[in-house]
Amino acid sequence: MEYVLLVVGFVLLIKGADFFVEGSSSLAQILKVPSVVIGLTIVAMGTSAPEASVSINAALAGSNDIAISNVVGSNIFNGLVVVGVCAFLSAFKTNRDILKRDMPLNILVTFILCLMFLDGKLSRIEGGILFAGMILYIAVMIYHAIKNKSENEPEKILSLPKSIIYMIAGLAAVIFGGDLVVDKACIIATNFGVSQNFIGLTIVAIGTSLPELVTSIVATKKGDSGLALGNAIGSNLFNILFILGFSAILSPLHVLNESIIDCGILLISSILLFIFAKTKQHMSKLEGIVCIGLYLAYMGYLLI
């Protein structure tokens, strides 16, 4: 029964995030908020809502292992599997802005997180620093986007009452789904005699990263495989700055030695992905296969 409820939790997380994004985006357009601001805030946070709900619920419940491993595991999955699968399906050129700004920033933020982990905890002050970094990142992104006037075409707008209903229902589904996933993941870990850290790095991390994988594969089939890289890097930055930052502000997180090692692996994979993307400003099918192979090797390491 726990497995069924775990799947139900993932469905609530993913569909709830969709409803929340659609409702809040429509409300923002009704209030005349520029679409570029909507894209960089509401939609970006919406795609990270499953990870946020799981990690924040876990932090509040005292399940620090899942709160941290969910983010670290999701980021490794995004960088190696999401980008790797899309590169394998269709090789793509890498965007200059992502190469010059987002990928180096992702490496820097991951490196800072590794340093914060070394003392065995993520304090409220460190969480505040990460969260402040997210606010600064969004502000800079919005400034550049408005400066370049990259306004998107307006999408279909829901009515005001419907927008509010979508937002409330979506948020409720995300919160309840996150609570369900954390609860059932802990029970499954206990039943199998494995750590919450292992469950967080595998089942929970992969489950909460499904929206990024599906979105990127759909984009690849439409001939926009380069979107996968921006999607993965943007999600990884939000996961560290917003989710871990906010989780630590709510409740300081204890960091396991295993999590320090996993964060180091995340840093290495981020640097490797940058090298692949930087080489000829192109991600080849072979590089995609290497990324997927490295993730499978990482899964093998976790099972040992």
Image: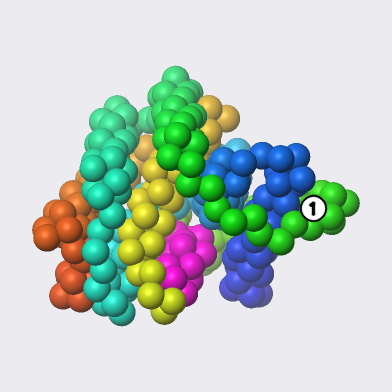
Question: In terms of image quadrants, where is residue 13?
Answer: bottom right
- Say if 96 sits above or below 199 in the image: above
Q: Is residue 122 visible?
A: yes
- What residue is drawn where x is 29% and y is 46%? 97
- The quadrant in which the N terminus is found is bottom right
Q: Label 1's element?
A: helix
Q: Does 204 appear in magenta?
A: yes
Q: How many marks?
A: 1
Q: Is residue 176 visible?
A: no
Dominant secondary-structure state across the stretch colored magenta: helix
- The quadrant in which the C terminus is found is bottom left
Query: Dot 1: few (<14), some (14–19), or many (≥20) neighbours within 10 Å?
Result: many
Residue 265 place in picture, x, y as percent: 22, 51
Question: In terms of image quadrants, where is residue 148?
Answer: top left
Q: Residue furthest right?
A: 161
Residue 292 place in picture, x, y as percent: 25, 71
Front residue of 274 and 77: 274
Residue 47 place in picture, x, y as percent: 54, 55
3 sits left or right of 107 in the view: right
Residue 74 place in picture, x, y as percent: 40, 56
63 sits left or right of 226 in the view: right
Front residue of 31 and 105: 31
- What residue is drawn where x is 88% and y is 51%? 161
Q: Does 80 appear in magenta?
A: no
33 sits left or right of 203 in the view: right
Amino acid at dot 1: Ser
Q: Which residues are magenta?
A: 203-220
Label 1 sits on residue: 163
Q: Residue furthest top?
A: 125
- Say if 63 sits above or below 80 in the image: above
